Image (cartoon, rainbow, N blue to C red):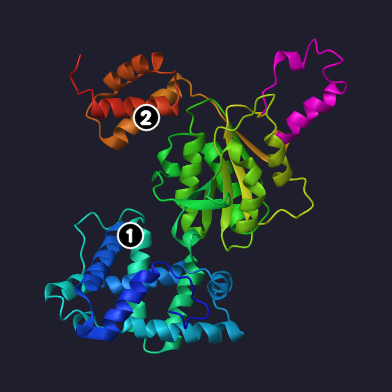
């Protein structure tokens, strides 16, 4: 792969080298190398859910994961022309030769079952999501592999690739919905995928119609390139704030929405996070769950600077959504208001305003309150009907109201936990 111009530093280069060696040397290849290639391709197939020709799936996977000037420009514009395109055509010609490797010819000395295993691999029914990708992402890669294998010329091959980059992107942001932040061994900020996201939709939340509408309106404006606000979802615990964020992600992922979850101790990394994502062809929500600060904590100042206050223009493809039990985010004790000695803070009002200013930087504030009895009963009955629980409404409500008295009070979370109890532990007719 040394002759590549743009597509360098490919994932799993050892598999490339081994397969090329097997194709070139034929009978002179070692059985150990052959076994290693077969094992590696099968392991990748199980991990990612690949089916069909595993060699073609592997090649396609490396092509859609390589972030280089051509793929990044194609992600934003659909196709990069000029000299970049000429360099890409050079690399594509190499990949076309790799696609033409005949597994039966290469593997004729491996035993008759091995080439068949690699050329028509099948997972057990129901397992085709793999360990890393959901079925939708996995299907995209398998479909691309089939299209690239049929390309007659290097330009047709490149056209298929560019269509994929335009529609789905390149690298981790093209394949995953949600991300978290960590530091590598060198102390550098790394944005890594969250491979399994709870598959909940906004319609799964019973009630909360006005809250969901405000969230959807703001998010749709953001995705369509119109003006949109940072959002603070505040209110009582267990009322659906975090679930709404997950619902937004699942609903608008096909339209380019991505979510990066960060925690309070990572606010120092916000500038590095913004630097990495500001020029990508996606819309990013930086998500902060259960956000609040104690009086002695100063991390909120990093957040204020990123939201609004620095010299650099805020990127158009980034918003901040936060959930909190507090409307004003920063704890303000009684001593902040009364009996403050002059030696504590000469400019008391300035200090209070500094604390309140963080909340003010969220242009959209959406309140989530605990449901009343009538609304709680409605949530319980709706969840029971959706799940097909074989209990009468009267018995459900009687049991649900007993449950909430000893499990934190009325909330959507309490109702869902009660339904889990009913389905998993209690049986109709139990005393």
Percent coordinates x, y for residue 196 in the rendering: 39, 48
Q: Residue at x 49, y 53 (%)?
A: 252
Q: Which residues are magenta?
A: 330-358
Dot label at residue 206: none
Asked if marks 1 and 2 touch (Cβ < 8 Å), the reply is no
Dot label at residue 416: 2
* Label 1 secondary element: helix
| Front: mark 1 or 2 | 1
Percent coordinates x, y for residue 378 in the rendering: 40, 27
Residue 144 in view here: no
Q: Is residue 418 magenta?
A: no
State whether residue 110 is above or below residue 230.
Answer: below
Sequence-first disc among 1 and 2: 1
Q: Is residue 346 magenta?
A: yes
Q: Is residue 103 left or right of residue 166?
A: left
Dot label at residue 48: 1
Q: Is residue 289 left or right of residue 160?
A: right
């Amino acid at each position: 792969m040394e002759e590549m111009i743009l597509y360098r530093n490919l994932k799993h280069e050892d598999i490339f080298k081994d397969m090329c060696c097997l194709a070139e040397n034929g009978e002179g290849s070692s059985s150990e190398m052959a076994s290693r290639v077969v094992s590696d391709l099968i392991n990748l197939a199980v991990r990612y859910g690949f089916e069909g020709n595993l060699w073609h799936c592997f090649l396609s996977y490396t092509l859609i994961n390589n972030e280089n000037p051509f793929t990044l420009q194609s992600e934003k514009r659909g196709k990069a022309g000029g000299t970049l395109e000429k360099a890409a055509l050079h690399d594509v010609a190499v990949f076309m030769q790799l696609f033409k490797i005949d597994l039966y010819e290469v593997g004729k000395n491996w035993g008759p079952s091995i080439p068949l295993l690699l050329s028509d691999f099948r997972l057990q029914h129901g397992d085709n999501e793999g360990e890393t990708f959901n079925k939708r992402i996995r299907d995209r890669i398998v479909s691309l592999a089939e299209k690239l294998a049929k390309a007659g010329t290097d330009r047709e091959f490149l056209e298929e690739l560019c269509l994929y980059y335009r529609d789905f992107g390149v690298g981790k942001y093209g394949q995953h919905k949600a991300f978290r932040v960590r530091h590598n061994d060198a102390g550098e900020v790394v944005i890594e995928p969250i491979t399994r996201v709870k598959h909940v939709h906004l319609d799964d939340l019973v009630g909360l119609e006005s809250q969901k509408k405000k969230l959807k309106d703001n998010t749709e404006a953001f995705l369509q390139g119109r003006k949109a606000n940072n959002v603070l979802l505040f209110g009582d615990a267990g009322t659906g704030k975090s679930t709404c964020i997950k619902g937004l992600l699942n609903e608008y992922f096909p339209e380019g929405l991505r979510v990066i979850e960060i925690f309070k101790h990572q606010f120092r990394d916000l500038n590095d996070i913004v630097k990495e994502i500001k020029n990508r062809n996606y819309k990013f929500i930086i998500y902060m769950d259960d956000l609040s600060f104690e009086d002695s904590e100063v991390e909120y100042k990093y957040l204020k600077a990123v939201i609004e206050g620095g010299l650099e223009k805020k990127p158009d493809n980034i918003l901040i959504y936060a959930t909190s039990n507090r409307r004003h985010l920063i704890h303000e004790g009684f001593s902040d208001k009364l009996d403050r000695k002059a030696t504590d803070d000469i400019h008391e009002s300035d200090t209070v305003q500094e604390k309140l200013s963080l909340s003010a930087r969220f242009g959209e504030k959406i309140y989530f309150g605990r449901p009343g009895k009538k609304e709680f009963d409605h949530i319980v009955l709706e969840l029971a009907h959706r799940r097909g629980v074989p209990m009468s409404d009267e018995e459900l409500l009687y049991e649900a109201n007993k449950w909430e008295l000893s499990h934190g009070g009325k909330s959507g979370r309490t109702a869902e936990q009660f339904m889990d109890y009913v389905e998993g532990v209690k049986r109709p007719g139990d005393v």
